[in-house]
Image (tube, grey):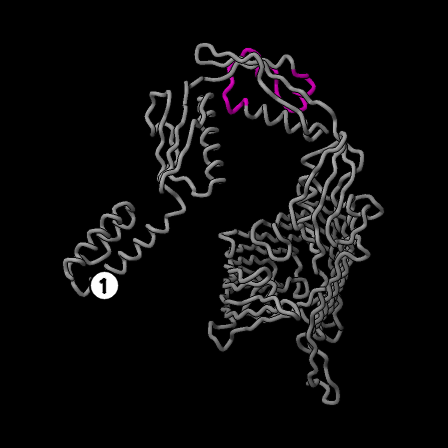
Amino acid sequence: MIGVKKQSTIEYKKRIRKYPFLLFIWRYFLPKASKKHLYIKKIFCISALWICLFKSFAQTVVYQLVNTEKPLNYFKLPYKIPQDSILQIQTLHKIIQTLQQKGFLLANVDKWQKKDDTLYITLHIGKQYRGFYLNVEEVSPYILSECRIRIPDLQKKLITPSTWKQIYRKLLTYAENHGFPFAEVKLDSVYFSNQNLYANLKYRSYFQVTLDTIILHGNLKIRYSYLMALMNLQPRAPFQQQKITNAFQTLRQQPYLRLTKEPLITFVENKAQIHLFTEHRKANQIDGILGILPNAQQNTRTVITGQLDIQLHHLLYSGKQLALKWQRMHQDAQLLNILYEHPHFLKTGITTMGALRLLRQDSSFQNVMQELRLSYPASLGKFSVFAKRMTSSVPIKNISTDIAAFQIISYGLGYHLQQLDDISFPQKGYKLKLDIWAGNKNTSQFLPDTLIKLKSLQLGLEGEMSYHLKQSSWATMLFRWQSAWVENPYLFLNDLYRIGGINSLRGFNENTFFTQWHHIFTAEQRWRLEEESYCFIFSDVAFLRENVKERAQEQQPWSIGAGISVRTRSGIFSLAYAIGKSEEQPFHPRFSKIHFGLTNRF
């Protein structure tokens, strides 16, 4: 038995030598002689073998080079090829492209054959050429100018294979975005001389194609005029590939529809038809909770508490949205948000949005904000201009140096970019939102027997960015950054942002912190259970500053936790357990928070 153990250990060592990092751990971190550590070594050996066995996603590759005198390491070819046949073809195609960019213009795969776990590839390398002498006299100077190809840079000058590749792509991209998807770019009268290639560039556009109709497949109900406006397409307009690609991406960002298959484009008699395979997605939601508590201030009455969240999408089958949110978690504060969004107002392509936000903080102050926003889609993202009017009223009986009545009328610019694979349950993609604004602030501060009126300029910035990193078909990592900042020489408590709770900083009560500026960083690991269910662990870290009058306070609260989101018959149930730490709240399970919700979609 001892001999068998020694023999197996030697075998482990042989396998481990293939992986230097395992050998380094074996020699310097694991004990060598002691018998009591033999089991530790054996466990490590088994783990090492497990890693070696599960390297099976790659296989051994043997290259046979034809017509070349250069050594194998000169070409820097990959020594691991995926086992999937489609990925193998893609990898070989990339190898040929790399060789051609290095000047081996005649490089090609003669044959490839798989035996057991080894792939034998025969590569015809050929001679290495320095570059091209390209004649572009047969191409229209106007097209070259539109493609930003300078003729003096090509006439009787040597160009590299990568430059030729750029010219080729520019001409084809220009053609497919100007109604000529069947255009052809090729080399004519090709000959080699003195390690150089000489050729004439030919460009043929053939016939022009126009956009005809959009054909819907599935149960989605949508107005055809709105669909064309949403995709930013016009019938009988020249075919534009980039515009159509952007339109498909826009559809993927709509919460009320799902693309069941990739869109299909068919060409019939110089006309293009777009086939969309869609289905209706349940995006409307209503969820809430109500409670009745005794009024501590008036013993004869009760107080209704809770929250209500209503979101209605795709009203009248034209993409309109109406949202209402009411929240009153205790008798001293309540929040009301109302939003209405009207896309493509009067068929102009402009989306209008109106919002009303009301915040009442016990009997200290009441903030009312009205907002009007106009947004217009661009080739990348969506730009907007907006105007805000915010008023804060303070009862005279609540005189304080930290609170003042004011009115701000501000104007700003916004940018919104969203590229997610799934708007409701994203696994990869990113989202960016940024608003910057400035306005005049009129302040009325009540001091004992004194009324002070102040005028000043107030600046603000709000931003949010999130990135979803897809690790596998069932694992995703979310990184998110939220930030806001307001600047004014006369800041009061009712000026500041309020953070804390499930939507910003978990592990704390809703709207716990008042901040002049804050940055919240979130890292969340998600494991997918089924199509619309997943479990997760997370960490939130915030950097914030409260600056009211002469009191400036900075702190870095943070929290960790875990949770689950499950699709049920009644809706999507989400539960998160979090423990947070700040200067006022110690890190202790006694102060942990449980955030839960049930969202019913229809």
Measured along the vertical axis of the image, is residue 1 above or below residue 192?
below
Position of residue 204 in the picture relative to residue 347 (left or right):
left
Q: State the residue at coordinates (80%, 47%).
A: 226
Q: Quadrant of the C terminus?
A: bottom right
Residue 158, magenta (yes or no): yes
Q: State the residue at coordinates (44%, 28%).
A: 109
What range of the chain is rendered magenta? 139-164
- In the rendered image, residue 132, in percent from the top left (x then y), is placed at 51, 16
- In front: 417, or 293? 417
Identify the residue position indicated by label 1 in the image: 39
Question: To which quarter of the image does residue 456 belong?
Answer: bottom right
- In the rendered image, residue 399, in percent from the top left (x then y), is placed at 71, 72
Question: Does the rendering let one see residue 407?
Answer: no
Measured along the vertical axis of the image, is residue 93 above or below residue 512?
above
Measured along the vertical axis of the image, is residue 474 above or below residue 148?
below
Are there few (<14), some (14-19), or many (20+) residues within 10 Å of tag 1?
few
